[in-house]
Image (cartoon, helix red, strand yellow):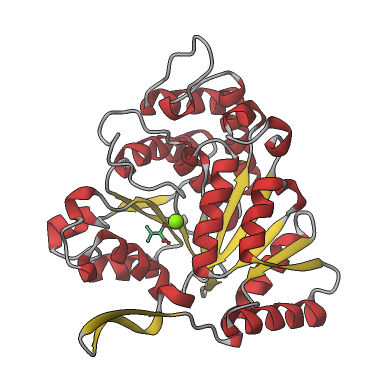
Amino acid sequence: MSNPSLLILPGDGIGPEVMAQVRRIIDWFGDKRDLKIDVSEDLVGGAAYDAHGTPLHDDTMAKAQEVDAVLLGAVGGPKYDVLDFSVKPERGLLRLRKEMDLYANLRPAQCFDALADFSSLKRDVVAGLDIMIVRELTSGIYFGEPRGIFEEGNERVGINTQRYTESEIERVARSAFELARRRGNKVCSMEKANVMESGILWREVVQKVHDEEYADVELSHMYADAGAMQLCRWPKQFDVIVTDNLFGDLLSDAAAMLTGSLGMLPSASLGAPMANGRPKAMYEPVHGSAPDIAGQGKANPIACILSFAMALRYSFDQGAEADRLEAAVAKVLEDGVRTADLLGEEGVEPVSTEGMGDAVLAALDASL
Ligand code: IPM
Ligand code: MG
């Protein structure tokens, strides 16, 4: 069998710095675990705009469609704020999601024991937290038509459209139920069925998929605003949360903070299976490009490293090696290794981005 292929798109800001550490880890798996991956690299976001005048070159898009998985760093930065909306760095990311049809965005929020005190919530509320947000990623208000800024009488009106078809809801619901079966067997679906027709349909369809195909999974429904409140009140009541594109964007940032630092959280965006049986897939940290600390060697590479662990699990059928990498990260945190985003403990000196990479590699070596 040929090696799995991975397209790396480091992007902007801290993207290239954190990705450099992931490349060392990919090399480690090649050398020490004989897990060879064909890695290629290209531009996305502002970096692509600087080189080609577009946040995603067509050739890069075509490459992304061919590989087994894409690993993306981050996009955006203040330098690009002045650009026209159509060529902003984010458009590159959204194009990848849409054209690869990556409809199921898995955003785990896991609180490492060693970091429970970093959360702004009390330790007992977050310690041991392990929830999975499944965010619909290719439809809803992010992509619905009509959209735009139009003239209406003597003023302008800004329009975006929330739109979901039954099949779009069905497929992401199935992803959530499938995941739940491999975890705590519970799904909570969130929408605003009290004010939005798209929410009424969402609720009906999720219930129907449940009743017809996944009656063994426990299903509940919550209005998304109440869900946000419950996430802060007692997040451990949840196992899998399934929700639309915009609510998922908001709820996953809130869930991320439960774990202490946005610098810790990976994500996987999955689509339909390709001819080789692997799902279309892109992996990316939940954090952004953090322009304020870019280029200073301060960024925490763990979210990106854990995104690669998700690629090992969901794209490369290497669950045991994913476990190994996640355990190495947990070990490093238990040992008190901290990047600057994780400070606050008495007498702890931060390590650099590369220092965190060194520590994870040492923990991987120790795992052999
Ligand atoms: C995310 C980000 C993106 C989104 C931006 C960068 C377009 O916030 O992945 O959560 O809104 O989806
Ligand atoms: Mg977001």
Residue 215: x and y, percent?
Answer: 84, 74
Pick whichever, 365 or 217, lies toward us.
217
Q: Nearer the viewer, residue 103 or 133?
A: 133
The answer to whether one can see residue 361 in this image is: yes
Along the viewing direction, whichever of 20 and 263 lies nearer the viewer:
263
Say which residue appears at 55% left-offset and 86% top-offset: 165
Residue placed at 69% from the left, 78% from the top? 203
Tell me what residue is drawn at x 46 percent, y 62 percent. 68
Q: Percent from the top left, x then y, of residue 264?
A: 51, 39
Q: Given the current orientation, which residue lies at the most extreme top position?
A: 347
Relative to 18, is 167 on the left or the right?
A: right
Quarter of the rendered structure image containing ligand 2? bottom left
Q: Is residue 311 visible?
A: no
* Residue 299, image x, y percentages: 37, 33
Please report the residue visible at 56 percent of the width from the left and 64 percent of the height from the top.
135
Tell me where residue 224 appears, x and y as whole percent.
62, 65
* Relative to 133, residue 161 above or below: below
